[in-house]
Amino acid sequence: MEQKNEHGFIGKHYLMKQAFGQEELHEREAVCTRDDPPACTASCPLHIDMRTVCSHVAKGDFKKAAGVIRTVTPFLHLLSKNCSRPCVQACRLSELGDGVCLPALERACALYGGSGAVNRFMLPKKSQKAAVFGDDLFALACCWELGKKGYEVHWYTTCSSMNDVLSAWGLSAEEAAADLTAFGGLRITLEKREERKREELEEMVSGADAGCVSPAFGWTELPEGVYTAERRETAEQLLAEAKHAAFLAERYIQGVHTGSEREEKESRLFVTMDGVEGSSVLADPEHVTKESAAAEAARCIQCQCVECIKGCVYLQHYRRNPRAAIREVYNNMSIVMGNHMANGMINACDECGQCRAACPNGFDYPDVCQIAKHTMVETGKMPGSAHEFALLDARFSNGEAYLAKPEPGYENCRYLFFPGCQATAVSPDTVEAAYADLRARLDGGVGLMLGCCGAVAKWAAREDLFQGAMEQLREQWERMGKPQVICACPTCKGIFDEYAGCSTVGIWEVLMESGVKPVSDETVSVHDACGARGDAKMQADVRAFAEALGCRIEEMPFEGDVSPCCGFGGLVKYTNAEVAGKKARFAAGRAKRKLLTYCMACRDQFSRAGADTCHILELAYQVEPRPVPDLSARRANRLRLKQKLLSELWKEGFEMETMLPVTYADGVMEQMEERMILKSDVDAALKAYEASQEAVFDEENRWFVTRHRLGNVTFWVKFTREESGYTVHGAYSHRMTVE
């Protein structure tokens, strides 16, 4: 629910989205067309999976291909010689040339697919009986359909044998025998009559539980439980109508009411034709060979919609399409304790919206993950450890490292510079240079706010923390006279625009308006951050800024609104380092040139992935990129920047907490980085030890082990005391209380 507070911005429960039921689940699933049949299958009255048939034939496996068709109908030879070819016209390749000649493939399957035996699940014999009236293909197909369902079938016909029906369709004795192989073992009794009169129908069905009548008779008023169809001409239509009539008869026998209309399938499947070239038919149904059939089948483009998957590392990693993923997430919300895999899937989605932008129908999977997160947080199912580190880091940004001041000499400001917490952590020199430049360029005072916009709390579905961040931001913004906020981070700008109600502008716009001098002649590729998704103006403005700096831009795959996430969004970096790493490598791997970002988190992730990258402001101010900072260095960078600005601009002191002298043994810092343990956490544990002298001595390794709880996490530190201080030999943490 959304509520506006007295300030005009979205207040309590602004983020909360309610869990949904089965009906909404089905509605959401229906948006995705991935499971819709391709056009060829949809156009076929029998809905044969010709995409799979093509796949098998292209590999020369005619037996498997024939098996696909025979699971739908046993009349492979008949169909191969009499199909009216609606699938050929429907084939997407027909837009560019000739559609795949699927009848040729059916003929090849009939010729080279082996025996006509059907590998079907043998249903148990049923006690009920069914009656079938007719002399045509419809009647014979009804016998098959009801017989394979386990019913005893009595076929009333003028035919002497089943072969009479098939020979009328031009089948040889051998071909007819092959198609009729599938009838073996079925309880079908042929009751030959010289003629079938309408008045005899009720008498004939009196001993049956349901029945089917050929539409060739033109009988309309039928006894209850007896079904017919519209008169059809083509083989595939007759077979399809028979299948439906038999289905209705079975439903009647089961006592389940159903309508008489046959549901027609239409394909909504989106298939991009980009890069597809048209070609001509390579196989003739009349003279098809194994080789020509395989070549013809290889023309099939295997229609499928993978628009969301092909650019999303998350979906690729979990080997899920959105329909499958949404059901797993839904099930996770619906059970008491939750499923660990589903929890992992939920927290590994960065909610970037790439899949939604790529989907032709706008399938909103990130929204489902967000709902799941909120539901799990509200019901206590979300493991607190999932987002613990990121939330503590955000609290640090808006606490110890927080700074909000008007420009020296001003009480109210016309502008407020908000660089974002990642910029201050990764490249404080760039933040300092940008703020100095803005003060020099703009009149009316430029205030400064160092902190977190609340995105971390939003991603973690912590409404209380997000609300606190918004109130803190609003309070300081109002104190400075409600200035226009200059954002250096697309995510921050989006948060402010949607939730804080502040007037915002990107720093790249401000700099362009006041003039930019070229500083580079490189060819670069611009990575569009998740926060810029859907904002064509921002994407264009950044490129214009890069060109004004002297850069030539070479676009990459998956740019603009379908640009992939760097792996930081949604806190994936903290909840699933494996997926985050894959995301960063994929996104960075698109570029053949230097990768230019306008989000500092992206710059950091790409640097960690080994890419040649820099932030556009680092380029603009010619700031030498620092080495990739570890987690402890990121916090230290924020504090040192705050201390320096307070001292040099506002002439105020800021005392940073003194840490104990600590040396780290080989490999310990890498271990701590992986486990997300900070130097300050180790320092707090050692100071707690000095106060309590509580520790366990490890006789084998000759070191002490102490513990200290910070928030929800207990930290354990292995150390030895030295004359100069402490040497740390290891550190780990977990969520438990030690009594």
Image: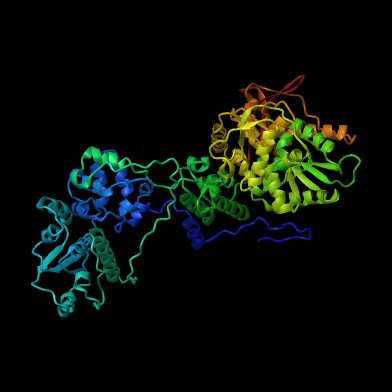
Quarter of the image that includes the N terminus: bottom right
Q: Toward which corner of the image does residue 198 lie, by quadrant?
A: bottom left
Q: Give how far across and how far down residue 642 sits, in percent.
A: 81, 35
Q: Foreground: 524 or 495?
A: 524
Query: What colouring method underlies this structural image?
Result: rainbow
Q: Which residue lies furthest to the right in this view?
A: 409
Q: Give how far across and how far down residue 577 sits, in percent.
A: 57, 36
At x 34% / y 52%, what residue is drawn? 40
Q: How many labels does the image show?
A: 0
Quarter of the image that includes the C terminus: top right
Q: In this view, does 430 lie to the left or right of 148?
A: right
Q: Is residue 213 above or below residue 301?
A: below
Q: In this view, does 114 lie to the left or right of 329?
A: left
Q: Give how far across and how far down residue 678 sits, in percent.
A: 69, 33
| Residue 737 visible within the image | no
Q: Foreground: 370 or 391?
A: 370
At x 15% / y 66%, what residue is drawn? 135
At x 89% / y 35%, what residue is drawn? 652
Q: Which residue lies furthest to the top in this view?
A: 723
Q: In this view, does 709 lie to the left or right of 160?
A: right
Q: Give how far across and how far down residue 189 sits, in percent.
A: 13, 65
Q: In this view, does 23 lie to the left or right of 457?
A: left
| Residue 569 visible within the image | yes
Q: Foreground: 133 or 150?
A: 133
